[in-house]
Amino acid sequence: MTFIENPIYVLGVLCLMVMLSIYAGKTQWGSKIGAALLVILFTAVLANLGVIPSASNTIPLYGGIFHYVAPISIFYLLLGVNLKSIKKAGAPMIILFLIGSLATVIGILVAWFLISPKEVLGDDANIIAGMLTGTYTGGSINFNAVALEYDFQEQGNLYAGTIAVDNVVTTIWIMVTLAFPALLRKFWKDKKVKQSTTSNHEMEDDKIDLNALMWLAFLGISAFFLAELVKLILPNIPFMLTLSTIGILVAQIPFVSRLPGSHTLGLYLVYLFLAVIGAYCEVNAVLALKEIGITLLLFTSLAVFMHGILIILFGSLAYLDWDMISVASQANVGGGPTALAMAESFGRKELVLPAILIGTLGNALGTYLGFLVVGVLA
């Protein structure tokens, strides 16, 4: 194990980047970017400079953060949810998400005919198109579901290269969706959802103490364990759906809803998760594939760009709220955790629960759309 692969060292660097991002996000220039985007940028630079491991030389710590930290962060943020105040945000988010899913499929098909990836990628091109359709509908679960069906993981370098391209494009799209609401408002004013917050306690009053910490630690670990048990008994039920449901139900208990610190703790863990997302943005892995890498990058980038254009155009016609459109798009491209982080970054607490729910919907829908695209392009 090399020095930069030491998990204590890497965790220390990630925590430092989170801290720097939060401080930088409070400055005049940083507030225009936001701490969520800054932490991705900071760790992406470090990973590409070789200061910390990247996707091609990933370490178990990264996997642990994806597997444990990201889901538990969602659980903690859901402890602030008040079910009585989310009714108005639910239907529009689902509509926008479905528009985004359709936009993903159209984007893949348009990119297929404009880039002609089959000329370079051969018979694997339609499988890759299906994998990308899946992942840009609901996340990496769909990506791997399509890949495993066709044994694409045995393709070695091509499989790794597709993952690298996916990581780079996803990271860039997180940056774009964080930035475009403020940019679009300069040209086209939107109308935000007017309703009370879904939070049971405001962030300013969310100062954690020892009593709250011991309860939150117990609740988070217990909920995760219970969700895993449900997954073993009922494997067809998505793990995140179970964990989110537990979080929502527990949040309605007055004692739990009054515990301070759940928002602070959950948000910190989300930033840690985003730091790893940045570390996975590996430019060299894409460039190393040369013509194949360039073709994959062009094909994927154009597909996601088309998704963005379509969800902005048709989403604004259905529901003119740039923050909500951005969160829905991110639920498609990045999945529930990044959509949740975006809702938090925009200060839209009423979108936290819908972001998780449509992220789960994407996990269910993405695989079907991925197989559909493979069949259509075969």
Image (spheres, rainbow, N blue to C red):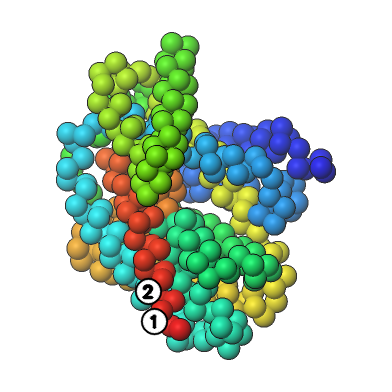
118 lies above or below 362:
below
Q: Is residue 147 visible?
A: yes
Q: Nearer the viewer, residue 11 or 146?
A: 146
* Residue ID at (53%, 41%): 67
- Residue bearing the label numbered 2: 372
Residue type highlighted by circle 1 = Val
Image quadrant in which the N terminus is located:
top right
Residue 313 appears in which quarter of the rendering?
bottom left
Residue type highlighted by circle 2 = Leu
User: Mark 1–mark 2 contact, CB under 8 Å?
Assistant: yes
Q: Position of residue 258 (x, y in %)?
A: 30, 18
- Please tell me the numbered disc located at residue 48: none
Q: Position of residue 105 (x, y in %)?
A: 37, 73
Q: Is residue 346 visible?
A: no
Q: Position of residue 222 (x, y in %)?
A: 44, 25
Image quadrant in which the C terminus is located:
bottom left
* Residue ID at (48%, 61%): 145
Real-space CA distance between mark 1 and mark 2, rounded to the nearest whole angstrom: 6 Å
211 lies above or below 244:
above
Q: Quick one: SS at disc 1? A: helix
Left or right side of 232 for 284? right
Would you call the spot at circle 2 few (<14 residues within 10 Å), some (14-19), or many (20 or more)? Answer: some
- Residue bearing the label numbered 1: 376
